[in-house]
Image (cartoon, helix red, strand yellow):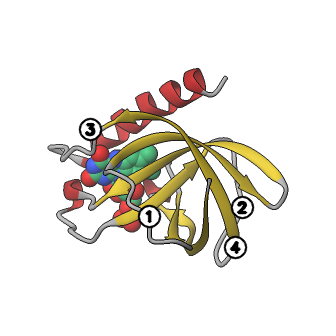
Amino acid sequence: MHTATVIHGYKNGRKFGFPTANLRLDEEVQIAKGVYAVWVEVEDNTYKGMLYVGTRPTLSLSELTYEVHILDFQGSLYGKRLSFTIVQQIREEKSFPSVDELVAQLSRDREMVREVLK
Ligand SMILES: Cc1cc2nc3c(=O)[nH]c(=O)nc-3n(C[C@H](O)[C@H](O)[C@H](O)COP(=O)(O)O)c2cc1C
């Protein structure tokens, strides 16, 4: 289980239909780059989530970021505390030829997460 503070609101990626909470982890842990099915706990509720650890190469960015998209969640998480538990890696990080292809992959990731966490 990892604990974190949400450092950007639940807004990044909203334009793609996949808003994410950008996380600052409490502890300096090494999580290998990739996409993971996670259980997310926030404000006494538990949600299915997909955690992304990577540098967002599709957007030509290079800073290592931790982002989580929480399934079936709406609202603002900015500044809030949450914890997550990694259940399974879904795939590796990838540089997609276009944002559309990244978004298509995110839809498949979400299906996989629902399958893994059902
Ligand atoms: C579950 C998940 C998987 C992701 N996988 C990748 C990936 O493989 N490659 C990549 O470049 N970005 C990936 N991203 C990061 C997206 O590029 C980023 O969330 C999106 O572009 C929104 O960024 P922005 O609103 O900060 O611009 C992933 C994000 C999530 C939530």
The image shows residue 32, relative to residue 89, as above or below, that is: below
Task: Name the residue carrying label 1.
Answer: 29
Task: Name the residue carrying label 3.
Answer: 101
For the point 50% across and 33% down, which residue is it? 110
Within 10 Å of disc 2 (Cα), the crowding (few <14, some 14-19, many 20+) is few
From the viewer's perspective, tell me whether residue 114 is left or right of residue 35. right
- Secondary structure type for disc 2: loop
Q: What's the residue type where badge 4 is placed?
A: Lys
Within 10 Å of disc 4 (Cα), the crowding (few <14, some 14-19, many 20+) is some
For the point 57% across and 42% down, which residue is it? 38
Q: What's the residue type where badge 1 is placed?
A: Val
- Secondary structure type for disc 1: loop
Q: Which is nearer the N-term, disc 3 or disc 4?
A: 4
Within 10 Å of disc 3 (Cα), the crowding (few <14, some 14-19, many 20+) is few
In which quarter of the view is residue 83 placed?
bottom right
For the point 14% across and 43% down, which residue is it? 97
Where is residue 60 shown, x and y percent of the image?
A: 17, 63
Task: Name the residue carrying label 4.
Answer: 80
Report the mark closest to the observer, 4 or 1: 1
Report the mark closest to the observer, 1 or 2: 1
Q: Look at the numbered discs 3 and 4 and tell me whether their residues touch, using CB distance below 8 Å.
A: no
Report the mark closest to the observer, 2 or 4: 4
Q: Which is nearer the N-term, disc 4 or disc 1?
A: 1
In the image, 84 versus 52, the foreground residue is 84
Task: Name the residue carrying label 2.
Answer: 75
